[in-house]
Amino acid sequence: MGRTAAESEWRAAGARLLARLHDSLATFRPPPRPAPAFQESGLYGDPPQDALELDDPALDRWLAEFHARHPLRHPLHGDYHTGNTLARDGGIVAVLDWDETFVGAPEVEPAAAALEWGDDELGPSREFVAAYHEAGAPGKGHGSG
C-alpha cells in the first residue's frame, strides 16, 4: 500500500477507533478465555505453541518482562487489521471477528496493529501509532465519545 493522503487518513481512522475501543473497554473484566489467544504467545515467557517456527526465546523473555512491568490490563481485540473492519460511506463503522480477544497490557495491541495497518512498513506503522496516541490513552477518557 502506498502513502496517499486517503490511505494515511484511513490508517489514522483505524488507530483512533482502536484507541476508543481500548478506552471503552478499560474497566471491563471478562471471564477467562477457554484457550489462549494467538497474541498471548510469549506474554508469560512461554514459546508459541501453535507456531513453533516463531520461537524466539530472547524475544519471549523481553515480552514477558515488558508485560510484567506494565500491570494495566483490559480486553484487547487480538486481531485488529483492516480485514476485520467494516466500512460504509468512507468511514469505519464496525470491528469484526472478536474470537482472538484476550486480556493483556494495552500497549501490546497497537504494536501488532501498527504492523498490519502499516503494511509492515516503518513510516505507515509510525503514523498508526501516532494517531493512536493522539486519540488518547486507554482508561483516561480521551478516546470516549
Image (tube, rainbow, N blue to C red):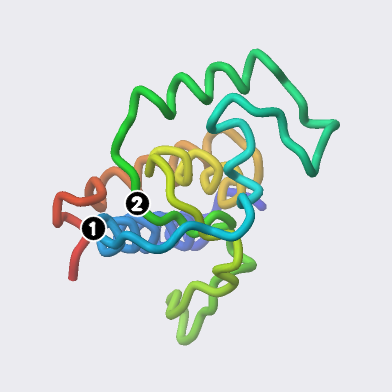
Q: Residues within 10 Å of mark 1 (few under 14, many from 20)?
A: few
Vertical comparison of 69 with 26: above or below? above
Vertical comparison of 8 with 126: above or below? below
**Looking at this rendering, what residue extends furthest in the left direction?**
141
Picture residue at 34% right of the left edge, 44% below the top: 73
**Looking at this rendering, what residue extends furthest in the top direction?**
58
Callout 1, which amino acid?
Thr
Q: Residues within 10 Å of mark 2 (few under 14, many from 20)?
A: many
Please tell me which residue lies in front, 143 or 118: 143
Callout 2, which amino acid?
His
Where does residue 8 sit, x and y in percent of width and height? 47, 54
Quadrant into which the C terminus falls: bottom left
Please tell me which residue lies in front, 29 or 12: 29
Please tell me which residue lies in front, 104 or 94: 104
Where does residue 41 sit, x and y in percent of width and height? 63, 38
Q: Quadrant of residue 76?
A: bottom left
Q: Is residue 123 left or right of residue 83?
A: left
The circle on residue 27 is 1
Picture residue at 26% right of the left edge, 64% below the top: 24
Where does residue 15 sit, x and y in percent of width and height? 40, 55
Contact between marks 2 and 1 (CB within 8 A): the answer is yes
Picture residue at 40% right of the left edge, 38% below the top: 107
Tell me the SS state at disc 2.
Answer: strand
Between the C-alphas of marks 2 and 1, the distance is 7 Å
Where does residue 62 sit, x and y in percent of width and height? 53, 17
Please tell me which residue lies in front, 85 or 125: 85
Vertical comparison of 15 with 40: above or below? below
Q: Quadrant of residue 60?
A: top right
Picture residue at 65% right of the left edge, 28% below the top: 46
Sequence-earlier tag: 2 or 1: 1
Vertical comparison of 92 with 79: above or below? below
The circle on residue 74 is 2
